[in-house]
Image (cartoon, rainbow, N blue to C red):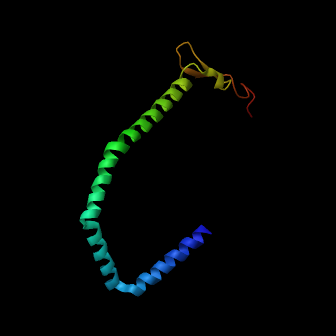
Amino acid sequence: MSKLSFLAGAAAGYVLGARAGTQRYEQIKTQATKLWSSDPVQTKVAQATEAAKTKAAPFVADVVSDAAKTTAQKLRDVRGGDDEHLPETLHRGTDGKLHAEHNFGPGPGKLP
């Protein structure tokens, strides 16, 4: 249903845009530019930009920092001594690295 709505909207926009023509497009573009360049709009843009820098940036930095710490801890847990989740064919050697068993498969002389 959403694809059908989108296509219907796109078709209506195309038809209306084609009927309005280039002249109407230029009028709309000029009015939009005047509105965007107006002092009240630019004042609000400056206020929003400043608010984003002072209020949102620390919040985003905290969220990213917390996510990084959580991910790092999970990686340490997996890489560390949490061997109970390893398959039976893997084990941690005396050097602390993971090693695979070499005695898997059908065995010597059992291949066709």
Which of the 4 quarters of the picture holds residue 88? top right
Seen from this angle, which residue lies furthest top? 94
Which of the 4 quarters of the picture holds residue 37? bottom left
Tell me if residue 8 comes above or below residue 57 in the rendering. Answer: below
Tell me if residue 58 comes above or below residue 105 in the rendering. Answer: below
Residue 30 image position (x, y, % from top left): 28, 76
Residue 55 image position (x, y, % from top left): 35, 43
Count of numbered marks: 0
* Residue at position x 51%, y 24% in the image: 76
* Residue at position x 52%, y 75% in the image: 9
* In this picture, residue 59 sits left or right of residue 7: left
The C terminus sits in image quarter: top right
Residue 53 image position (x, y, % from top left): 31, 45
* Residue at position x 59%, y 72% in the image: 4
Taking depth in this image into account, of 81 and 66 the one nearest to the observer is: 66
Taking depth in this image into account, of 101 and 43 the one nearest to the observer is: 43
Seen from this angle, which residue lies furthest bottom? 19
Tell me if residue 41 comes above or below residue 9 in the rendering. Answer: above
* In this picture, residue 34 sits left or right of residue 66: left
Tell me if residue 8 comes above or below residue 45 in the rendering. Answer: below
Which of the 4 quarters of the picture holds residue 82? top right
Taking depth in this image into account, of 37 and 74 the one nearest to the observer is: 37
The N terminus sits in image quarter: bottom right
Seen from this angle, which residue lies furthest front? 40
